Image (cartoon, rainbow, N blue to C red):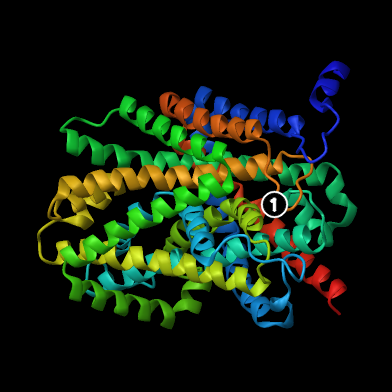
Amino acid sequence: MAIVEEALNSAAKPVAGRPVTDRRMQIISLALIFGSAVLLTLFPEQGKTTLDGLFKWMTTSFDFAFLGVGFCALVFVLWLAASRFGAVKLGDVDTAPEFTWTAWGAMVFLAGIASGLMLWAGTEWAYHYAWTPFELEAKTPQMFTVGQAYGIFHWGPTAWALYCIPAVAMSYIYYVRKTHIYKVSEACRGALGSIVDGPVGRVIDYLFIFGILGAAATSLGLGTPMIGGALANVLSVEPNVWMDVVIILCCTAVFSISSGLGLDEGIKRLSYFGSLLTLAIIVYVLFAGPTGFIVALGMDSIAYTVTNYITMSLWTDAVGHSGFPQAWTVFYWAWWVAYAPFMGLFVTRISMGRKISEVIIGLLTFGTAGCVLFYVVLGGYGIDQQIKGLLPMADLVNDNGVAPAIIEMFKTLPASSIVLVAVALSGIVMLATTFDSAAYVMACASTKELDEGQEPSRGNRLFWCGAIAVLPVSLLFLGGLKTMQTAVVLVGLPIIVILVFMMVTTVRFLKEDHL
Protein backbone atom coordinates (compact mmCIF):
# COMPACT_ATOMS: atom_id res chain seq x y z
CA MET A 1 0.00 0.00 0.00
CA ALA A 2 2.85 2.37 0.76
CA ILE A 3 4.22 1.88 -2.76
CA VAL A 4 0.78 2.52 -4.29
CA GLU A 5 0.34 5.61 -2.11
CA GLU A 6 3.72 6.89 -3.22
CA ALA A 7 2.91 6.22 -6.86
CA LEU A 8 -0.37 8.07 -6.62
CA ASN A 9 1.21 11.10 -5.01
CA SER A 10 4.48 11.12 -6.86
CA ALA A 11 5.12 13.86 -9.37
CA ALA A 12 8.06 15.92 -10.39
CA LYS A 13 8.48 19.21 -8.64
CA PRO A 14 6.28 21.75 -10.39
CA VAL A 15 8.07 23.60 -13.10
CA ALA A 16 7.43 27.33 -12.79
CA GLY A 17 4.25 28.19 -14.64
CA ARG A 18 3.46 24.58 -15.52
CA PRO A 19 0.25 23.00 -14.09
CA VAL A 20 0.72 19.73 -12.15
CA THR A 21 -1.86 16.96 -12.68
CA ASP A 22 -3.44 15.30 -9.66
CA ARG A 23 -2.91 11.64 -10.61
CA ARG A 24 -4.65 10.42 -7.47
CA MET A 25 -7.88 12.11 -8.50
CA GLN A 26 -7.64 10.73 -12.03
CA ILE A 27 -7.11 7.13 -10.89
CA ILE A 28 -9.66 7.07 -8.08
CA SER A 29 -12.31 8.81 -10.20
CA LEU A 30 -11.93 6.31 -13.02
CA ALA A 31 -11.94 3.40 -10.58
CA LEU A 32 -15.21 4.60 -9.05
CA ILE A 33 -17.02 5.20 -12.33
CA PHE A 34 -15.84 2.03 -14.05
CA GLY A 35 -16.45 -0.01 -10.90
CA SER A 36 -20.05 1.20 -10.93
CA ALA A 37 -20.35 0.44 -14.65
CA VAL A 38 -18.99 -3.09 -14.19
CA LEU A 39 -21.46 -3.83 -11.40
CA LEU A 40 -24.34 -2.57 -13.53
CA THR A 41 -23.33 -4.75 -16.46
CA LEU A 42 -22.54 -7.88 -14.42
CA PHE A 43 -25.84 -7.67 -12.55
CA PRO A 44 -28.12 -5.83 -14.99
CA GLU A 45 -31.49 -6.98 -13.65
CA GLN A 46 -30.60 -6.55 -9.99
CA GLY A 47 -28.96 -3.21 -10.74
CA LYS A 48 -31.95 -1.95 -12.72
CA THR A 49 -34.43 -3.06 -10.05
CA THR A 50 -32.39 -1.49 -7.26
CA LEU A 51 -31.79 1.80 -9.06
CA ASP A 52 -35.40 2.09 -10.25
CA GLY A 53 -36.55 1.55 -6.68
CA LEU A 54 -34.10 4.15 -5.39
CA PHE A 55 -35.16 6.60 -8.09
CA LYS A 56 -38.85 6.19 -7.24
CA TRP A 57 -38.06 6.60 -3.55
CA MET A 58 -35.99 9.72 -4.26
CA THR A 59 -38.55 11.44 -6.48
CA THR A 60 -41.49 10.71 -4.17
CA SER A 61 -39.76 11.23 -0.80
CA PHE A 62 -37.70 14.28 -1.76
CA ASP A 63 -39.87 15.90 -4.42
CA PHE A 64 -40.36 18.90 -2.13
CA ALA A 65 -36.57 19.27 -1.77
CA PHE A 66 -35.87 19.31 -5.51
CA LEU A 67 -38.76 21.63 -6.29
CA GLY A 68 -37.96 23.88 -3.32
CA VAL A 69 -34.25 24.16 -4.09
CA GLY A 70 -35.00 24.85 -7.77
CA PHE A 71 -37.39 27.69 -6.94
CA CYS A 72 -35.10 29.08 -4.21
CA ALA A 73 -32.15 28.99 -6.62
CA LEU A 74 -34.03 31.20 -9.09
CA VAL A 75 -35.10 33.66 -6.38
CA PHE A 76 -31.57 33.67 -4.92
CA VAL A 77 -29.73 34.46 -8.15
CA LEU A 78 -32.24 37.16 -9.15
CA TRP A 79 -31.79 38.78 -5.73
CA LEU A 80 -28.01 38.48 -6.00
CA ALA A 81 -27.94 40.06 -9.46
CA ALA A 82 -30.14 42.96 -8.34
CA SER A 83 -28.31 43.53 -5.03
CA ARG A 84 -25.17 45.60 -4.50
CA PHE A 85 -23.20 42.36 -4.74
CA GLY A 86 -24.17 42.05 -8.39
CA ALA A 87 -21.68 44.80 -9.23
CA VAL A 88 -18.75 42.81 -7.81
CA LYS A 89 -16.24 42.10 -10.57
CA LEU A 90 -14.78 38.64 -10.97
CA GLY A 91 -11.16 39.68 -11.11
CA ASP A 92 -9.11 42.80 -10.60
CA VAL A 93 -10.72 46.19 -11.19
CA ASP A 94 -8.91 46.69 -14.52
CA THR A 95 -9.45 43.11 -15.77
CA ALA A 96 -11.32 43.01 -19.08
CA PRO A 97 -13.55 40.02 -19.97
CA GLU A 98 -11.53 37.28 -21.65
CA PHE A 99 -14.30 36.46 -24.17
CA THR A 100 -16.86 38.53 -26.03
CA TRP A 101 -20.54 38.15 -25.17
CA THR A 102 -21.09 36.18 -28.38
CA ALA A 103 -18.31 33.70 -27.64
CA TRP A 104 -19.24 33.45 -23.97
CA GLY A 105 -22.92 32.88 -24.74
CA ALA A 106 -22.24 30.27 -27.42
CA MET A 107 -19.92 28.28 -25.15
CA VAL A 108 -22.28 28.44 -22.19
CA PHE A 109 -25.36 27.46 -24.19
CA LEU A 110 -23.86 24.51 -26.06
CA ALA A 111 -21.97 23.22 -23.01
CA GLY A 112 -25.23 23.06 -21.06
CA ILE A 113 -27.58 21.33 -23.50
CA ALA A 114 -25.68 18.56 -25.44
CA SER A 115 -27.98 17.15 -28.14
CA GLY A 116 -30.90 16.49 -25.78
CA LEU A 117 -32.51 19.83 -26.57
CA MET A 118 -33.02 18.98 -30.25
CA LEU A 119 -34.69 15.70 -29.24
CA TRP A 120 -36.97 16.96 -26.51
CA ALA A 121 -37.91 20.31 -28.06
CA GLY A 122 -39.78 18.60 -30.88
CA THR A 123 -41.31 15.78 -28.85
CA GLU A 124 -41.86 16.56 -25.15
CA TRP A 125 -45.27 18.12 -25.79
CA ALA A 126 -46.47 14.73 -27.09
CA TYR A 127 -45.85 13.05 -23.73
CA HIS A 128 -47.74 15.78 -21.86
CA TYR A 129 -50.50 15.66 -24.49
CA ALA A 130 -51.21 12.07 -23.40
CA TRP A 131 -50.29 12.36 -19.68
CA THR A 132 -51.51 15.68 -18.37
CA PRO A 133 -50.76 17.85 -15.33
CA PHE A 134 -53.36 19.48 -13.04
CA GLU A 135 -55.97 16.80 -13.90
CA LEU A 136 -56.51 18.36 -17.32
CA GLU A 137 -58.26 16.26 -19.94
CA ALA A 138 -55.79 14.39 -22.16
CA LYS A 139 -55.57 14.76 -25.94
CA THR A 140 -57.52 18.00 -26.17
CA PRO A 141 -56.55 21.13 -28.15
CA GLN A 142 -55.64 22.83 -24.86
CA MET A 143 -52.90 20.26 -24.27
CA PHE A 144 -50.94 21.38 -27.34
CA THR A 145 -50.36 24.70 -25.59
CA VAL A 146 -49.90 23.25 -22.10
CA GLY A 147 -47.63 20.46 -23.36
CA GLN A 148 -45.31 22.89 -25.12
CA ALA A 149 -45.44 25.27 -22.14
CA TYR A 150 -44.28 22.55 -19.76
CA GLY A 151 -41.30 21.78 -21.99
CA ILE A 152 -40.37 25.48 -22.03
CA PHE A 153 -40.67 25.49 -18.24
CA HIS A 154 -38.42 22.44 -17.84
CA TRP A 155 -35.66 24.05 -19.95
CA GLY A 156 -36.25 27.58 -18.70
CA PRO A 157 -35.00 29.99 -16.02
CA THR A 158 -35.04 27.54 -13.08
CA ALA A 159 -32.79 25.09 -14.91
CA TRP A 160 -30.25 27.80 -15.73
CA ALA A 161 -30.53 29.27 -12.22
CA LEU A 162 -29.32 25.92 -10.88
CA TYR A 163 -26.25 26.39 -13.08
CA CYS A 164 -25.76 29.92 -11.73
CA ILE A 165 -25.29 28.79 -8.11
CA PRO A 166 -21.97 26.94 -8.55
CA ALA A 167 -20.84 29.35 -11.30
CA VAL A 168 -21.04 32.38 -8.99
CA ALA A 169 -19.68 30.56 -5.92
CA MET A 170 -16.65 29.15 -7.74
CA SER A 171 -15.94 32.28 -9.79
CA TYR A 172 -15.93 34.50 -6.71
CA ILE A 173 -13.56 32.24 -4.80
CA TYR A 174 -11.27 31.84 -7.80
CA TYR A 175 -11.08 35.41 -9.14
CA VAL A 176 -11.83 37.60 -6.12
CA ARG A 177 -10.49 35.56 -3.22
CA LYS A 178 -7.63 34.32 -5.42
CA THR A 179 -7.92 30.72 -4.23
CA HIS A 180 -6.72 28.95 -7.37
CA ILE A 181 -7.95 25.48 -6.47
CA TYR A 182 -10.35 24.32 -9.14
CA LYS A 183 -12.52 21.96 -7.06
CA VAL A 184 -16.21 21.87 -6.18
CA SER A 185 -15.44 21.29 -2.51
CA GLU A 186 -13.66 24.64 -2.32
CA ALA A 187 -16.94 26.40 -3.17
CA CYS A 188 -18.45 24.93 0.03
CA ARG A 189 -15.74 26.23 2.37
CA GLY A 190 -17.79 29.17 3.58
CA ALA A 191 -20.47 26.78 4.87
CA LEU A 192 -18.34 23.81 5.96
CA GLY A 193 -15.03 25.44 6.91
CA SER A 194 -11.96 23.20 7.15
CA ILE A 195 -14.13 20.09 6.81
CA VAL A 196 -13.69 20.40 3.04
CA ASP A 197 -9.98 19.61 3.47
CA GLY A 198 -10.82 16.10 4.70
CA PRO A 199 -12.89 13.10 3.55
CA VAL A 200 -16.07 15.18 3.14
CA GLY A 201 -14.35 17.40 0.59
CA ARG A 202 -13.02 14.41 -1.33
CA VAL A 203 -16.50 12.84 -1.44
CA ILE A 204 -17.89 16.09 -2.87
CA ASP A 205 -15.20 16.18 -5.57
CA TYR A 206 -15.67 12.53 -6.53
CA LEU A 207 -19.44 12.97 -6.71
CA PHE A 208 -18.75 15.77 -9.18
CA ILE A 209 -16.55 13.54 -11.38
CA PHE A 210 -19.07 10.67 -11.20
CA GLY A 211 -21.83 13.04 -12.23
CA ILE A 212 -19.93 14.39 -15.23
CA LEU A 213 -18.72 11.04 -16.58
CA GLY A 214 -22.09 9.41 -16.06
CA ALA A 215 -23.98 12.36 -17.52
CA ALA A 216 -21.67 12.32 -20.54
CA ALA A 217 -22.45 8.65 -21.10
CA THR A 218 -26.15 9.37 -20.72
CA SER A 219 -26.07 12.27 -23.18
CA LEU A 220 -24.36 10.06 -25.72
CA GLY A 221 -27.03 7.44 -25.09
CA LEU A 222 -29.75 10.00 -25.83
CA GLY A 223 -28.07 11.75 -28.73
CA THR A 224 -26.57 8.81 -30.62
CA PRO A 225 -29.94 7.26 -31.70
CA MET A 226 -31.03 10.59 -33.20
CA ILE A 227 -27.76 11.03 -35.09
CA GLY A 228 -27.76 7.37 -36.16
CA GLY A 229 -31.38 7.53 -37.27
CA ALA A 230 -30.70 10.62 -39.38
CA LEU A 231 -27.69 9.04 -41.09
CA ALA A 232 -29.45 5.69 -41.57
CA ASN A 233 -32.32 7.39 -43.39
CA VAL A 234 -29.97 9.30 -45.66
CA LEU A 235 -27.90 6.18 -46.42
CA SER A 236 -30.98 3.90 -46.64
CA VAL A 237 -29.62 1.42 -44.10
CA GLU A 238 -30.85 0.08 -40.78
CA PRO A 239 -29.45 1.68 -37.61
CA ASN A 240 -27.22 -0.70 -35.64
CA VAL A 241 -24.81 -0.76 -32.73
CA TRP A 242 -21.76 -0.40 -34.98
CA MET A 243 -23.15 2.79 -36.45
CA ASP A 244 -23.58 4.07 -32.89
CA VAL A 245 -19.96 3.19 -32.12
CA VAL A 246 -18.75 5.05 -35.22
CA ILE A 247 -20.81 8.09 -34.19
CA ILE A 248 -19.31 8.03 -30.68
CA LEU A 249 -15.80 7.72 -32.13
CA CYS A 250 -16.48 10.65 -34.48
CA CYS A 251 -17.66 12.75 -31.53
CA THR A 252 -14.56 11.67 -29.62
CA ALA A 253 -12.26 12.64 -32.48
CA VAL A 254 -13.89 16.08 -32.78
CA PHE A 255 -13.80 16.94 -29.09
CA SER A 256 -10.33 15.43 -28.59
CA ILE A 257 -8.90 17.66 -31.33
CA SER A 258 -10.78 20.65 -29.95
CA SER A 259 -9.69 19.92 -26.38
CA GLY A 260 -6.10 19.49 -27.50
CA LEU A 261 -6.22 22.91 -29.15
CA GLY A 262 -7.40 24.51 -25.90
CA LEU A 263 -10.18 26.83 -24.83
CA ASP A 264 -9.68 29.72 -27.23
CA GLU A 265 -8.66 27.82 -30.37
CA GLY A 266 -10.80 24.72 -29.74
CA ILE A 267 -13.94 25.02 -27.62
CA LYS A 268 -14.73 28.61 -28.68
CA ARG A 269 -14.50 27.87 -32.41
CA LEU A 270 -16.44 24.62 -32.09
CA SER A 271 -19.15 26.48 -30.15
CA TYR A 272 -19.39 29.13 -32.87
CA PHE A 273 -19.79 26.49 -35.57
CA GLY A 274 -22.31 24.49 -33.54
CA SER A 275 -24.37 27.57 -32.75
CA LEU A 276 -24.53 28.70 -36.38
CA LEU A 277 -25.42 25.21 -37.65
CA THR A 278 -28.20 24.58 -35.13
CA LEU A 279 -29.56 28.10 -35.63
CA ALA A 280 -29.65 27.48 -39.38
CA ILE A 281 -31.73 24.33 -38.83
CA ILE A 282 -34.17 26.18 -36.55
CA VAL A 283 -34.53 29.09 -38.99
CA TYR A 284 -35.12 26.68 -41.87
CA VAL A 285 -37.85 24.79 -39.97
CA LEU A 286 -39.47 28.09 -38.98
CA PHE A 287 -39.74 29.39 -42.54
CA ALA A 288 -40.23 26.07 -44.33
CA GLY A 289 -43.04 25.22 -41.92
CA PRO A 290 -46.20 27.13 -40.96
CA THR A 291 -44.43 30.26 -39.70
CA GLY A 292 -47.52 32.08 -38.49
CA PHE A 293 -48.86 29.10 -36.54
CA ILE A 294 -45.46 28.38 -34.97
CA VAL A 295 -45.07 31.97 -33.75
CA ALA A 296 -48.67 32.22 -32.51
CA LEU A 297 -48.56 28.90 -30.63
CA GLY A 298 -45.20 29.89 -29.20
CA MET A 299 -46.70 33.09 -27.81
CA ASP A 300 -49.58 31.12 -26.27
CA SER A 301 -47.19 28.64 -24.67
CA ILE A 302 -44.86 31.31 -23.30
CA ALA A 303 -47.87 33.16 -21.87
CA TYR A 304 -49.07 29.97 -20.15
CA THR A 305 -45.60 29.33 -18.71
CA VAL A 306 -45.25 32.87 -17.35
CA THR A 307 -48.78 32.92 -15.92
CA ASN A 308 -48.43 29.55 -14.16
CA TYR A 309 -44.70 29.62 -13.34
CA ILE A 310 -44.98 29.55 -9.55
CA THR A 311 -47.61 26.80 -9.61
CA MET A 312 -45.53 24.68 -11.99
CA SER A 313 -42.44 25.29 -9.82
CA LEU A 314 -43.94 24.16 -6.52
CA TRP A 315 -46.69 21.68 -7.49
CA THR A 316 -46.18 18.21 -5.93
CA ASP A 317 -49.74 16.92 -6.42
CA ALA A 318 -49.79 15.70 -2.81
CA VAL A 319 -53.54 14.99 -2.96
CA GLY A 320 -54.08 13.72 -6.50
CA HIS A 321 -50.97 11.48 -6.59
CA SER A 322 -50.82 11.59 -10.38
CA GLY A 323 -47.03 11.19 -10.28
CA PHE A 324 -46.66 13.81 -13.03
CA PRO A 325 -44.42 16.33 -11.19
CA GLN A 326 -42.25 13.52 -9.83
CA ALA A 327 -41.79 11.82 -13.21
CA TRP A 328 -41.16 15.07 -15.07
CA THR A 329 -40.22 18.18 -13.10
CA VAL A 330 -38.38 16.40 -10.27
CA PHE A 331 -36.55 14.23 -12.82
CA TYR A 332 -35.53 17.28 -14.82
CA TRP A 333 -34.35 19.18 -11.74
CA ALA A 334 -32.31 16.16 -10.61
CA TRP A 335 -30.78 16.05 -14.09
CA TRP A 336 -29.91 19.75 -14.08
CA VAL A 337 -28.55 19.50 -10.54
CA ALA A 338 -26.26 16.59 -11.51
CA TYR A 339 -24.85 18.76 -14.33
CA ALA A 340 -24.64 21.95 -12.22
CA PRO A 341 -21.14 21.56 -10.71
CA PHE A 342 -19.68 20.86 -14.16
CA MET A 343 -21.33 23.95 -15.61
CA GLY A 344 -20.22 25.96 -12.59
CA LEU A 345 -16.58 25.06 -13.15
CA PHE A 346 -16.81 25.66 -16.90
CA VAL A 347 -18.53 29.05 -16.53
CA THR A 348 -15.92 29.98 -13.92
CA ARG A 349 -13.13 29.32 -16.40
CA ILE A 350 -14.61 31.64 -19.07
CA SER A 351 -15.98 34.42 -16.84
CA MET A 352 -12.88 36.29 -15.71
CA GLY A 353 -13.47 40.05 -15.86
CA ARG A 354 -17.28 39.88 -15.75
CA LYS A 355 -19.52 41.12 -12.94
CA ILE A 356 -21.59 38.70 -10.88
CA SER A 357 -24.78 40.21 -12.32
CA GLU A 358 -23.45 39.71 -15.86
CA VAL A 359 -22.80 36.02 -15.25
CA ILE A 360 -26.26 35.49 -13.77
CA ILE A 361 -28.22 37.49 -16.35
CA GLY A 362 -26.08 36.03 -19.14
CA LEU A 363 -26.77 32.44 -18.09
CA LEU A 364 -30.48 33.05 -17.59
CA THR A 365 -30.83 34.99 -20.85
CA PHE A 366 -28.69 32.98 -23.27
CA GLY A 367 -29.80 29.66 -21.81
CA THR A 368 -33.51 30.34 -21.56
CA ALA A 369 -33.83 32.21 -24.87
CA GLY A 370 -32.01 29.46 -26.77
CA CYS A 371 -34.11 26.69 -25.27
CA VAL A 372 -37.39 28.59 -25.81
CA LEU A 373 -36.47 29.12 -29.47
CA PHE A 374 -35.93 25.37 -29.95
CA TYR A 375 -39.16 24.44 -28.20
CA VAL A 376 -41.29 27.03 -29.99
CA VAL A 377 -40.04 26.17 -33.49
CA LEU A 378 -39.54 22.39 -33.36
CA GLY A 379 -42.48 21.78 -31.02
CA GLY A 380 -44.72 24.07 -33.03
CA TYR A 381 -43.86 22.30 -36.28
CA GLY A 382 -44.53 18.88 -34.76
CA ILE A 383 -47.87 20.03 -33.31
CA ASP A 384 -48.89 21.42 -36.70
CA GLN A 385 -48.16 18.04 -38.29
CA GLN A 386 -50.31 16.37 -35.62
CA ILE A 387 -53.26 18.78 -35.96
CA LYS A 388 -53.33 18.53 -39.76
CA GLY A 389 -53.17 14.73 -39.65
CA LEU A 390 -49.94 14.68 -41.69
CA LEU A 391 -47.91 12.84 -39.03
CA PRO A 392 -49.18 11.13 -35.84
CA MET A 393 -46.43 12.63 -33.69
CA ALA A 394 -48.12 11.87 -30.35
CA ASP A 395 -48.43 8.16 -31.20
CA LEU A 396 -44.91 7.98 -32.60
CA VAL A 397 -43.41 9.53 -29.47
CA ASN A 398 -45.38 7.46 -26.97
CA ASP A 399 -45.04 4.17 -28.91
CA ASN A 400 -41.54 4.40 -30.44
CA GLY A 401 -39.67 7.00 -28.37
CA VAL A 402 -38.27 10.44 -29.07
CA ALA A 403 -35.41 9.62 -31.47
CA PRO A 404 -37.47 7.78 -34.17
CA ALA A 405 -40.26 10.36 -33.83
CA ILE A 406 -38.02 13.40 -34.34
CA ILE A 407 -36.45 11.77 -37.42
CA GLU A 408 -39.89 11.15 -38.92
CA MET A 409 -40.74 14.80 -38.26
CA PHE A 410 -37.64 16.07 -40.05
CA LYS A 411 -38.43 13.77 -43.00
CA THR A 412 -41.61 15.77 -43.67
CA LEU A 413 -39.62 18.93 -44.44
CA PRO A 414 -38.66 19.99 -47.97
CA ALA A 415 -35.14 18.81 -48.92
CA SER A 416 -35.35 16.37 -45.99
CA SER A 417 -32.11 14.54 -46.88
CA ILE A 418 -30.09 17.74 -46.55
CA VAL A 419 -31.92 18.55 -43.30
CA LEU A 420 -31.15 15.10 -41.86
CA VAL A 421 -27.46 15.45 -42.73
CA ALA A 422 -27.45 18.84 -41.02
CA VAL A 423 -29.23 17.35 -37.99
CA ALA A 424 -26.68 14.54 -37.74
CA LEU A 425 -23.76 16.96 -38.06
CA SER A 426 -25.37 19.33 -35.57
CA GLY A 427 -25.90 16.48 -33.11
CA ILE A 428 -22.25 15.45 -33.36
CA VAL A 429 -21.05 19.02 -32.87
CA MET A 430 -23.38 19.65 -29.91
CA LEU A 431 -22.28 16.45 -28.21
CA ALA A 432 -18.64 17.18 -28.99
CA THR A 433 -18.94 20.71 -27.57
CA THR A 434 -20.46 19.46 -24.34
CA PHE A 435 -17.87 16.69 -23.90
CA ASP A 436 -15.07 18.99 -24.92
CA SER A 437 -16.15 21.31 -22.13
CA ALA A 438 -16.56 18.38 -19.72
CA ALA A 439 -13.08 17.01 -20.47
CA TYR A 440 -11.64 20.48 -20.05
CA VAL A 441 -13.36 20.99 -16.69
CA MET A 442 -12.33 17.56 -15.38
CA ALA A 443 -8.76 18.34 -16.41
CA CYS A 444 -9.00 21.60 -14.46
CA ALA A 445 -10.43 19.79 -11.44
CA SER A 446 -7.64 17.21 -11.54
CA THR A 447 -4.92 19.89 -11.63
CA LYS A 448 -3.44 20.72 -8.24
CA GLU A 449 -3.36 24.45 -8.82
CA LEU A 450 -4.38 26.51 -11.83
CA ASP A 451 -3.64 30.21 -12.11
CA GLU A 452 -5.97 32.67 -13.81
CA GLY A 453 -5.94 32.22 -17.58
CA GLN A 454 -3.80 29.08 -17.29
CA GLU A 455 -4.90 25.84 -18.96
CA PRO A 456 -4.46 22.28 -17.64
CA SER A 457 -1.85 20.20 -19.43
CA ARG A 458 -2.76 18.83 -22.85
CA GLY A 459 -2.09 15.28 -21.66
CA ASN A 460 -4.55 15.75 -18.81
CA ARG A 461 -7.23 17.08 -21.17
CA LEU A 462 -6.77 14.20 -23.61
CA PHE A 463 -6.84 11.71 -20.72
CA TRP A 464 -10.37 12.79 -19.84
CA CYS A 465 -11.41 12.80 -23.51
CA GLY A 466 -10.52 9.12 -23.60
CA ALA A 467 -12.33 8.42 -20.33
CA ILE A 468 -15.51 10.07 -21.61
CA ALA A 469 -15.42 7.99 -24.82
CA VAL A 470 -14.58 4.58 -23.36
CA LEU A 471 -17.41 4.46 -20.80
CA PRO A 472 -20.39 4.88 -23.18
CA VAL A 473 -18.90 2.51 -25.77
CA SER A 474 -18.44 -0.14 -23.06
CA LEU A 475 -21.95 0.34 -21.71
CA LEU A 476 -23.36 0.34 -25.25
CA PHE A 477 -22.09 -3.20 -25.82
CA LEU A 478 -22.80 -4.44 -22.30
CA GLY A 479 -26.32 -3.04 -22.13
CA GLY A 480 -25.95 -0.89 -19.03
CA LEU A 481 -26.46 2.55 -20.56
CA LYS A 482 -30.08 3.16 -19.49
CA THR A 483 -29.35 1.91 -15.98
CA MET A 484 -26.38 4.27 -15.83
CA GLN A 485 -28.72 7.14 -16.68
CA THR A 486 -30.77 6.40 -13.57
CA ALA A 487 -27.62 6.13 -11.46
CA VAL A 488 -26.48 9.57 -12.56
CA VAL A 489 -29.79 11.22 -11.73
CA LEU A 490 -29.55 9.76 -8.22
CA VAL A 491 -26.37 11.82 -7.77
CA GLY A 492 -28.66 14.86 -7.81
CA LEU A 493 -29.89 14.13 -4.28
CA PRO A 494 -26.61 14.81 -2.44
CA ILE A 495 -25.73 17.60 -4.88
CA ILE A 496 -28.81 19.64 -3.91
CA VAL A 497 -27.29 19.76 -0.41
CA ILE A 498 -23.99 20.90 -1.96
CA LEU A 499 -25.83 23.68 -3.83
CA VAL A 500 -27.27 24.91 -0.52
CA PHE A 501 -23.73 24.96 0.92
CA MET A 502 -22.63 26.99 -2.10
CA MET A 503 -25.38 29.57 -1.58
CA VAL A 504 -24.38 29.92 2.08
CA THR A 505 -20.71 30.22 1.09
CA THR A 506 -21.42 32.90 -1.52
CA VAL A 507 -23.43 35.10 0.87
CA ARG A 508 -20.98 34.65 3.74
CA PHE A 509 -17.90 35.51 1.69
CA LEU A 510 -19.59 38.46 -0.04
CA LYS A 511 -20.65 39.94 3.29
CA GLU A 512 -17.19 39.40 4.79
CA ASP A 513 -15.45 41.07 1.85
CA HIS A 514 -17.93 43.83 0.98
CA LEU A 515 -19.43 45.15 4.20
* x then y, percent, for residue 363: 55, 66
Name the residue carrying label 1. Answer: 453
Q: Quadrant of the C terminus?
A: bottom right
Position of residue 103 relative to residue 32, above or below, is: below
Q: Nearer the viewer, residue 363 or 187?
A: 363
* x then y, percent, for residue 151: 38, 65
Q: In the image, what residue type sits under mark 1?
A: Gly
Other-residue count near label 1 (Cα within 10 Å), few / some / many at <14 / 14–19 / ≥20: few
Q: Residue furthest left?
A: 389
* x then y, percent, for residue 261: 55, 39
* x then y, percent, for residue 296: 24, 78
Q: Quadrant of residue 78?
A: bottom right
Position of residue 427 relative to residue 380, above or below, is: above
Q: Which type of secondary structure does the marked residue at label 1 adopt?
A: loop
Position of residue 24 relative to residue 324, above or below, is: above
Residue 224 lies left or right of residue 204; in this view the side is left
Q: Nearer the viewer, residue 375 or 466?
A: 466
Q: Quadrant of the N terminus?
A: top right
Q: Quadrant of residue 39?
A: top right
Count of residue discs:
1
Position of residue 243 relative to residue 492, above or below, is: above
Q: Which residue: 75% across, 46% down?
A: 450
Q: Which residue: 82% across, 70% down?
A: 508
Q: Quadrant of residue 73?
A: bottom right
Residue 353 lies left or right of residue 511; in this view the side is left
Q: Which residue: 60% across, 43% down?
A: 440
Q: Which residue: 29% across, 37% down?
A: 228
Residue 323 appearing in the image: yes
Residue 315 appearing in the image: no
